[in-house]
Amino acid sequence: MKPALVHAVLMFAIAGVASSTALAAGDAAKGEKVFSGECSDCHSVTAGKNKKGPSLNGVNGRKAATVAAFAYSDAMKASDITWSPEKIDAYITKPKKVVPGGKMKYDGLDDEKDRADVIAYLLSLH
Amino acid sequence: MHTRFSIGRWLAAVTLFVALAPTAHALPSFARQTGEACTACHIGGFGPQLTPHGQRFKIGGYTDWDGSSRWMPLSGQAIGGYTHTRKPYDEKGGNNGTRFNEGSIFAAGRVSDHVGGFVQATYDGIAHDWALDHTDLRLVDTRTVAGNDLVYGVSFNNNPTVQDPFNTLSVWGFPYTSSALAGSPAAASLIGGGRGLEHHVGGLSVYGFYNNSVYAEVGTYRTIAPRTQVALGEGKDSDPGRLGDNAYWRLAYTQDLKKRAWSVGVFGMNGGLHLRGAFAADQTAGNFHDIGVDGSYQYLGTREHIATLNTSYLHETASSLGSSGHLNEFKLNTSYFYRNTYGVTLGYFSTTGTAFGPYSADPANPNSPNSRGYITELNWTPFGKEDSWLAPWANVRVGLQYIGYQKFDGEGGSTARNNNTLFGYIWTAF
């Protein structure tokens, strides 16, 4: 393997590990508070409890636009997303960038640590 | 031009509103419509102080919903309490009394993605009669302008400032309820309710809310025909007169930073009132020009500790029957809520101005309109959260409020303090 290619592979691997570490390092307890301030007006973590947004209980691994009895936007239905920590992170960073035309009226959560915490909280709900 | 309303048209409009709203299994309320807890829209888990989320719900025409619920667009509330004043509040010499203040029913909810609102009818527990209360019906839409959302719409309402999304102006300002027995200062501005426009007018305003930050509105009102006012439950002598050409306007800038929010704004109303007809007892002839500034701050954090600050200052110039006067109204209040359950609010108010007929209980012998004092309130709101018992059906607030006067209609000292009022209340909504 050429040195340049090795370097690229290593950098990609490091970046991937760093990304996973950032998400994995989230604090679920802190994430619950972030959720309370940023998300809970429109989302419940109770299974089957939809608000202006769908329930986020069990969101990890779920295919987008599949919560029963919730009226999704056409854009979300067509997104073909399966929610993973990385996808959730990208989405809550800039919702309209990931799902243009989606109906979630949220500008995004800039703070990377807050995002990691709230994702850790969502993952803890399983 | 004078717009006339008939009781038949009102009833038809209300019936149509209720009929068009989705019906079904459960009782309505905005909480049921959206699936959200009361705390999402209301500071302290109980109306009417709005969070930024609640402000957007109102600006959006009360049309947000959970996409699947079906509900009856009906709701109700009841308020009762104990009043104690230093001096008697009635001719029988009573200064202690427990009364049922009022009970209301609401037709409230969305009709479609673009139509929503509420109509309130209230039974007055003191006067023992029903009347049409606050009404705000909206037609709204949203479009993207220069890459940002513009929510725009029309509000049909019956009380200037009832349509305002901030809790700094008269209709939705603190205190949110008060004793129905105790007296209150006589002087108030046109926009502050001093000329009795409340529920005696119908108005249309157009508004826009751009990029979740700039709110602008302009509108105009017409007084309802006197006989229709009576048909709607208002007193025979309470017609404020014919409201001539007038304009209501509002401009505000707000920022919702999730953990905190703030707003600053300006507002105003100009209008002339003219005597008319047989119902002249409460009418005023004159021209009134109001302009004001307001601001608010909310610390929301994780919703465990919430603090708010609301303030407004209004200046009115007026002329009536060859004389002129002015009035200044200042209000400041701050509140703290713990877990949207335990709340304390401290308020200060000051009204100053000239001795001027329309500002006095006896217009023929006007006295100083100056009043000044403070309001303290403690309240407990056990429900209103997502996991509350019988949420969102069971809602109650228990409060203890004290109003202390340093000046009352120009009088100071013990004469002012004689109007000090202790009010303990229970307020329930369902």
Image (cartoon, rainbow, N blue to C red):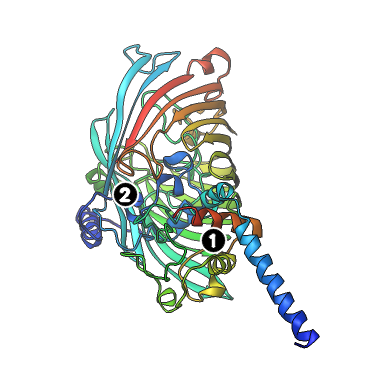
Q: Position of residue A86 (x, y in %)?
A: 57, 68
Is residue B215 shown left or right of residue B11? right
Q: Which chain does the residue under circle 1 lie in?
A: B
Q: Which chain does the residue under circle 2 lie in?
A: B
Q: Nearer the viewer, residue B244 or B25?
A: B25
Q: Which mark is residue B216?
A: 1
Q: Are marks 2 and 1 on the same chain?
A: yes
Q: Position of residue B143 (x, y in %)?
A: 48, 73
Is residue B274 shown left or right of residue A30? left
Instruction: Give the structural element (helix, strand or loop) at label 2.
Output: loop
For residue A7, what is the image quadrant? bottom right
Q: Nearer the viewer, mark 2 or mark 1?
A: 2
Amino acid under disc 1:
Ala
Q: Which mark is residue B29?
A: 2
Q: Nearer the viewer, residue A16 or B265?
A: A16
Is residue B17 shown left or right of residue B140? left
The answer to whether residue B194 of the structure is visible from this angle is no
For residue B196, what is the image quadrant? top left
Tell which circle, 2 or 1, labels the residue nearer the N-terminal end: 2
Q: Nearer the viewer, residue B430 or B238?
A: B430
The span from disc 2 to disc 1 (Cα, nearest Å) is 27 Å
Amino acid under disc 2:
Ser
Would you place residue B407 above or below residue A48 in this image? above
Is residue B195 shown left or right of residue B324? left
For residue B382, what is the image quadrant? top left
